[in-house]
Amino acid sequence: MIAASIVLLALAQNPGRGNAIARVLTPSGVGEIADDHYLVKWEDDDELVASPSATLDLFYSPTNTAPFRPGRVPDGIQGMEIARTLAVRDHANELEWRTSSVAPGAYFLWARTYDPEAGRPLPMISFSPGVVVVAHAGDPVAPAVILLPPANPFTWPQASSLEIRYAAFDPDHSGTVRIDGTSPTSEALMIADGLPAESDGLIVWDTSSLAEGEYILKATITDARGMSFAAFDRYARYVNPFDETEPDCGCTSTAKRSRSAPIAALVLLAGWFQLRRKAAGRRAIERRSIDLR
């Protein structure tokens, strides 16, 4: 059964009829190899939200994109057609993709739904959580890597480090993984390099010196054959959500504060935390993702 969050997201887009939404389910990890066919599966809102006019297009791409907000077409999106104008209200939610003529390589799949009867029609795009490798007889088998989402991608731990998990497919047994990031000010960061190409890789990223904000991560695997594959994270990672700096509230510092004003200080501090919680709530609504959840 489709997750309730998909329906809620669709209904939240506009007053009246919401936008139809579909989430690609396969591939779900790395290491799947297709020769002449591959079964694509997705989940959608069927008639719960979608109108009879709602359609679904499917594409494959050698890259995914940086996370983006629902209803927007991300910059740099690429796609080669698998199928067009499938009915969202079709309950089958699967399609056999004929891959015999597809060039060898590693690919993400992505879906685009569009409902002209929505209150404010928007193209809703989602990428597959994993990568399928297409290889025919005699072809080199491409490597692949993905960044694994945290257990709850919409909670931001108050900590000086962040766990980054990844899964790599290394058919040549010679690959290494590099993880890069982009700061809220578009500064490029090299987080780690030379990591083992494991199916359950883990590093702990020291974020203690970083500014608060959303960071975009990308993993790249490169092997001794010179073959490489890169994947953006499915979610923007929010780093250092509650810094320890004194709020700019117009009050004096603790060292200079009069003993006669402890209640006022507590009220100011409580008000500041409440504002931070509200701001965090707004950020949660606006957070970018390539997964419509």
Image (tube, rainbow, N blue to C red):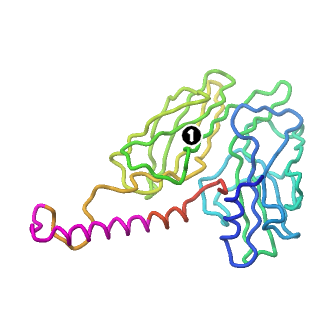
Q: Where does the image place residue 114, in percent across and percent down from the top left?
A: 79, 67
Few, some or many residues within 10 Å of mark 1 (<14, 14–19, 20+): many
Q: Is residue 166 left or right of residue 157?
A: right
Q: Where does the image place residue 204, in percent across and percent down from the top left?
A: 44, 36
Residue 191 falls inside the magenta stretch: no
Instruction: Describe the element under mark 1 as helix, strand or loop.
Output: strand
110, 262: nearer the viewer? 262
Disc count in the image? 1
Q: Where does the image place residue 105, in percent across and percent down from the top left?
A: 75, 36
| Quadrant hosting residue 196 | top right
| Quadrant hosting residue 208 | top left
Q: Is residue 264 left or right of residue 84?
A: left
Q: Give the residue displayed 62% in from the left and 31% down from the top.
A: 168
Task: Examine the rendered structure and indicate whether residue 16 appears above or below residue 126.
Answer: below
Q: Give the residue displayed 32% in from the left and 70% down from the top.
A: 271
236, 94: nearer the viewer? 94
Q: Give the residue displayed 81% in from the left and 31% down from the top.
A: 135
Magenta stretch prevailing secondary structure:
helix
Task: Examine the rendered structure and indicate whether residue 115 appears above or below residue 104.
Answer: below
213, 142: nearer the viewer? 213
**What's the amino acid at mark 1?**
Ala
Residue 277 falls inside the magenta stretch: yes
Q: Give the residue displayed 76% in from the left and 57% down from the top.
A: 22
Name, please, the residue furthest toward the top. 173
Q: Where does the image place residue 217, in percent across and percent down from the top left?
A: 52, 46
Instruction: Say which residue label 1 marks.
Output: 219
Q: Which quadrant of the figure contains the C terminus?
A: bottom right
Q: Which residues are magenta?
A: 255-279
Q: Is residue 175 left or right of residue 213?
A: right
